[in-house]
Image (cartoon, helix red, strand yellow):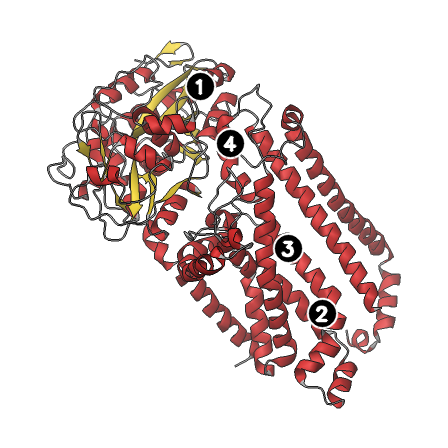
Amino acid sequence: MSRKALALMGAGVALTLAVTGCGSTSDVSDSGSGASAQVAFGDQICGKGGSDKPGYQNTIKALPGAADKLSGAGSTFVAPIMSVWTKDYASTGKVEVAYQSIGSGGGVKQISEGTVDFGASDTPMKDEELAKAKGGEILHIPLTLGAVVPAYNVKGLSSGLKFDGETLGKIFAGKITKWNDPAIKELNSGVDLPDEPIAVAHRSDGSGTTAVWTDYLTKESPTWKSTLGEGKSAGKEVAWPVGIGGKGNEGVSGVVNQTEGSIGYVELAYALAQNMKYGQVKNKAGKFVQPCVATISKGTDGVQYPADLRTSLTDGPDADAYPITGTTYALVYAKQADAAKGAALVNFLAWALTTGQDAASQVDYAPLGKDLQQLAFGQLKKITVNGAAVS
Amino acid sequence: MTEHRSASRGESSLLRRSRWRSGDAAFQVGVSAVGWLIIAILVGTAVFLIGESWSSLRHFGPLSFLTSTRWAPSEATSTQTDPNPYGIAQFVYGSLLTSMIAMLIAVPVSVMVALYITDMAPMWLRRPLSYLVDLLAAIPSVVYGFWGIFALIPAIRPVGQFLADTLGTAPVIGPLFAGPFFGVSYFTAGVILAIMVLPIITAICREVFAVAPIQEKEAAFALGATRWEMLRMAVLPRSRAGIIGASLLGLGRAIGETIAVTMVIGNNVLAISKSILGQGATMPSVIANEFTEANQPFHLQSLFVVALWLLILALIVNTVGKVVVRRVGKDIA
């Protein structure tokens, strides 16, 4: 055998070693087989089906003369469901939608400058951002719902640990530092909590997930609010008093999976895909609720919305609502000057809000609740294409 | 072709020169254009960075970035100037600390590996071994990061715990090793960086050791030197400048490395944690983390400030390195 061949063989061995070195991550891609397969804790509505495929009717007539290409950019949160949508829509609607998941901030920037047909953001645009938009009024159209869940890695603890807002707030503010703290014990009588330090994990990059999480903490935890300071306790980035930063949902789940005694927050889809242990959270009605498609959809029932839908969806009033729920907004200009593009955009969004909602639970997102779906549809009808209203 | 081959090297290059005079001119223009292009790119980058960061530098003052260790974009407003919410001293500390840990591990190991390859290993192993070391450089850094999280961290947890339990309680140096060790840390980042720069340093050291004069080596042996004494007398002293030069190239790589570090350093941007077992951030890691969602007032511009200081830091390291190499080189001559 020549030396070269030997060297090549050696190279192969080294590569195999490198690859198997991260073998433990290989189950990341095969995401859970849909949240409906989740096991429910106790008498929860999870896993009992029903609202997974709402079958909303599309009442907007397809506009003729539509372009066959659309471009969108923004939220990474919505990217998994968007990739399902664009694939399905390319085969049924014959329109190719190119979506770049560059982050919500990037989505806001691009739609403001008019370089894409629609943007997508996990947080509503601020007034000063709306004022800078080059194409006039921007509409916020909710697309799908997701949940942010407290995920932890503590020896001997399985999923279902109970938390309330103030306890989570104190943990993330660094005021509760041990797993057997009386506050956690009180919520979980009968659970054997270890005398171990808590390692807090959070996002290091600006993120819609962080915005939803901190928005909930701000509403429910006075300790969190006072520690971070008025007006600084919620947003895509906050000044975390304690903890380890991980980049992206996968960064946080990596830290949690690798660190004994840790707690972090990730989207439900990530927690399920990575077999992480996650907790139940007490909602406004005082009930401990497990996150799943059914409870997330309930999360938006009974919420009072402003006319432009720019509001936070956390802490819904329904008895079965999972309280840490968020949405991604499609950002579109109310006045569509280009008739072909405008028609294609309206057709696509109308499809996404109806047929598209049935696909959400495949990838562990929740379809919009009935109330919110109707309101989103109402926003869509405000679009005018070349001066003509959509009917 | 046969004539060509039979001609000595000098003649053939002479031949070629006369035949390709116009080619020569084109070559001359080509290489100088590329040379100047490099200069233009470097200067252009610097000008661009200054331009992009200018509004932030003017708003907060250029030095206020270096005197604060608190990076809190969420506290920035468009009017407030003092205190500067974009302190970057902790990132400078993080970059220097992780690179230093990497150098402390990588330089001795690389020198030993290179010596083994050039002078100690059995002949049949030398080529494959150098290929394998070179191959380490071909692994993408994001793979190193992944590997770091899922393989290295579990493996070095006992080491970190041991350091925290022993050195962490020692006087004077205690704070440098204070626990608890959660896995992600400066230390972990340093170890990853060490593995990443090892092939660079080893490759150059290998070349340097290989050109040590054979006569001197044989003379050492003839005087009854052992292999170790031979290496110490005939190879290492002549190679000092080369080793330092190699280390500097590695250091440059370590300071600039981004993704692998971001994945294992813990990304604490709010303060300097002095312990090497604590979490921090480096200058590239904060840029990678935040630029996609940099929506706060002066946020993006301040990330450009970080980039600017990173460029300056790299220039300083390189300049110091060049001076040291020249100095050491002179000593030998």
Disc 3 + disc 4, Cβ < 8 Å: no
Q: Is residue A61 visible?
A: no
Which numbered circle lies on residue B208? 2
Which amino acid, by three-letter code, is at mark 4? Ala
Please report, as a chain letter, where disc 1 is located.
A
Disc 1 + disc 4, Cβ < 8 Å: no
Q: Residues within 10 Å of mark 3 (few under 14, many from 20)?
A: many
Q: Secondary structure at mark 4?
A: loop
Disc 3 + disc 2, Cβ < 8 Å: no
Which numbered circle lies on residue B251? 3
Alpha carbon of mark 1 to alpha carbon of mark 4: how far? 20 Å
Which amino acid, by three-letter code, is at mark 3? Leu
Which is in the foreground here, disc 3 or disc 2?
A: 3
Q: Nearer the viewer, residue B57 or B199?
A: B57
Q: Nearer the viewer, residue A60 or A322?
A: A322
Q: Is residue B326 visible?
A: yes
Which is in the foreground here, disc 4 or disc 2?
A: 4
Task: Specify which label sits upstream in the sequence, 3 or 2.
Answer: 2
Task: Specify which label sits upstream in the sequence, 4 or 2.
Answer: 4
Which amino acid, by three-letter code, is at mark 1? Lys
Q: Which residue is mark 4?
A: B72
Above or below for A109 versus B142: above
Where residue A235 sits, quadrant-wise, is top left
Please report, as a chain letter, where disc 4 is located.
B
Alpha carbon of mark 3 to alpha carbon of mark 2: how far? 18 Å
Disc 1 + disc 2, Cβ < 8 Å: no
Q: Are marks 1 and 3 on the same chain?
A: no
Q: Are marks 3 and 2 on the same chain?
A: yes
Above or below for B328 versus A124: below
Which is in the foreground here, disc 1 or disc 3?
A: 3
Which numbered circle lies on residue A126? 1
